[in-house]
Image: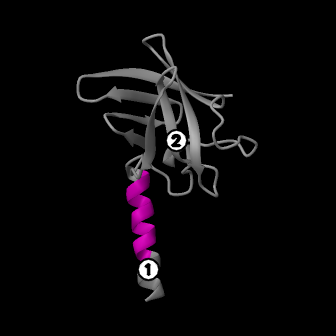
């Protein structure tokens, strides 16, 4: 049984490598945005989406995993208007979704979607 499991693991690793993925090089940034250990929950100065439309959208952590990944947050689209977003499990990259808004990304590149009507390319800035 152990040999079968090992063969399945090896086959999966070979398939991933053929597709350009490495089972050993997955980084936490591929699974969700990383928050530094010193950042407190509710701090809005650490993560900001800097977008091509000239605007910046702060992200305020609400819940952070033990590994330091952002799980839920408030995404500020106006000075005093925030949308609750949560991490949605993805195969590669991350997605944070809320009511009528979501952003997808991989590492520092993200695409902020305002419903089905518009989207803007952004860069995740972490101080």
Residue reaching furthest to the front: 80
Query: Looking at the picture, how far across and down is residue 18, in whole percent?
Result: 39, 51
> At x 63% / y 55%, what residue is drawn?
67
Q: How far apart are marks 2 and 1 (CA)?
A: 38 Å
Residue 93 visible from this viewpoint: no
Front residue of 111 and 75: 75
Q: With respect to residue 81, does 26 lie above or below?
A: below
Horizontally, residue 8 falls left or right of residue 37, namely: left
Query: Looking at the picture, how far across and down is residue 1, in whole percent?
Result: 43, 89
Asked whether 59 falls inside the magenta stretch, the response is no
Locate the C terminus and report the quarter of the image it occupies.
top right
* Callout 1 crowding tier (Cα within 10 Å): few <14, some 14–19, many ≥20: few
Horizontally, residue 39 falls left or right of residue 4, namely: right
| Magenta-drawn segment | 7-17
| Mark 2 vs 1, N-terminal side | 1
Front residue of 23 and 17: 23
Horizontally, residue 37 falls left or right of residue 118, namely: right
- The label shown at residue 5 is 1
> At x 37% / y 20%, what residue is drawn?
120
**Do the residues under discs 2 and 1 have CB atoms within 8 angstroms?**
no
> At x 58% / y 36%, what residue is drawn?
60
* Residue labelled with disc 2: 73
Most frequent secondary structure within the magenta stretch: helix
Residue reaching furthest to the top: 54
* Callout 2 crowding tier (Cα within 10 Å): few <14, some 14–19, many ≥20: many
């Amino acid at each position: 049984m152990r040999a079968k499991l090992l063969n399945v693991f090896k086959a999966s690793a070979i398939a991933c490598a053929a597709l350009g993925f490495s089972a050993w090089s997955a980084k936490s940034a591929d699974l969700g945005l990383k928050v530094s250990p010193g950042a407190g929950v509710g701090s809005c100065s650490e993560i900001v989406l800097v977008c091509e439309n000239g605007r910046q959208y702060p992200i305020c952590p609400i819940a952070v995993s033990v590994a330091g990944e952002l799980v839920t947050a408030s995404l500020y689209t106006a000075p005093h208007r925030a949308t609750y977003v949560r991490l949605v499990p993805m195969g590669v990259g991350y997605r944070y979704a809320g009511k009528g808004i979501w952003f997808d990304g991989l590492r520092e590149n993200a695409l902020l979607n305002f419903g089905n009507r518009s989207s803007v390319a952004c860069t995740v800035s972490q101080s």
